[in-house]
Image: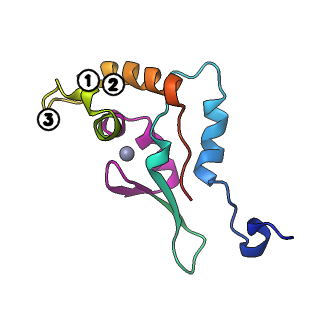
Amino acid sequence: MQSIEAQTGVPTKSLLFNSLKVYLNNKNRLQPIIGLGSIIECVKAGTQEMFYLCEVCVCRLGKADMRNHIMGSLHRYNYIKAWHPHLVCEWQEKSDLSRLAWPLMEMATVLEGKEGPGEVQV
Ligand SMILES: [Zn+2]
């Protein structure tokens, strides 16, 4: 029996997840990572070019940008709003995200401890 990977030549594990794994396993890292389950890894048809879709933020980014995106306040806010709306319901819809960076980071740390970073969809 051949694995799916051998049949299609496409790695079944997300490249982004692999590149983040090093960071995830770094005990000294400062940034919690959540919402990987909302990221979809895509390959542009006919090319090897990868791009990523973030379901909760409705955006499309390259690999390096998506890495930054996952650690950004906007992604945390959108993810928490989508999956744990009770946590952010006291906040104004248009509140200044830079002022919410710290509470968002704390929330993300708690969520990551509870449910883990998630897995990138391929
Ligand atoms: Zn996002």
Q: Amino acid at mark 3?
A: Glu
Q: Is 57 located above or below residue 77 in the figure? A: below
Residue under numbered circle 1: 100
Identified at 46% across, 22% down, the residue is 109
Q: Is mark 3 within 8 Å of ligand 1?
A: no
Measured in 3D between alpha carbons, the distance from the residue under mark 1 to the one under mark 2, in whole angstroms, is 6 Å
Identified at 44% across, 35% down, the residue is 71
Residue under numbered circle 2: 104
Q: Amino acid at mark 2?
A: Leu
Percent position of residue 18, x then y:
66, 46
Q: Which residues are magenta?
A: 53-76
Asked whether residue 39 is drawn in magenta, I would say no
Residue under numbered circle 3: 93
Quadrant of ligand 1: it is top left
Q: Is 56 located above or below residue 85 in the figure? A: below
Label 2 packing within 10 angstroms: few (<14), some (14-19), many (20+): many
Percent position of residue 67, x then y:
49, 43
**Total count of labels:** 3
Q: Is 83 located above or below residue 30 in the figure? A: below
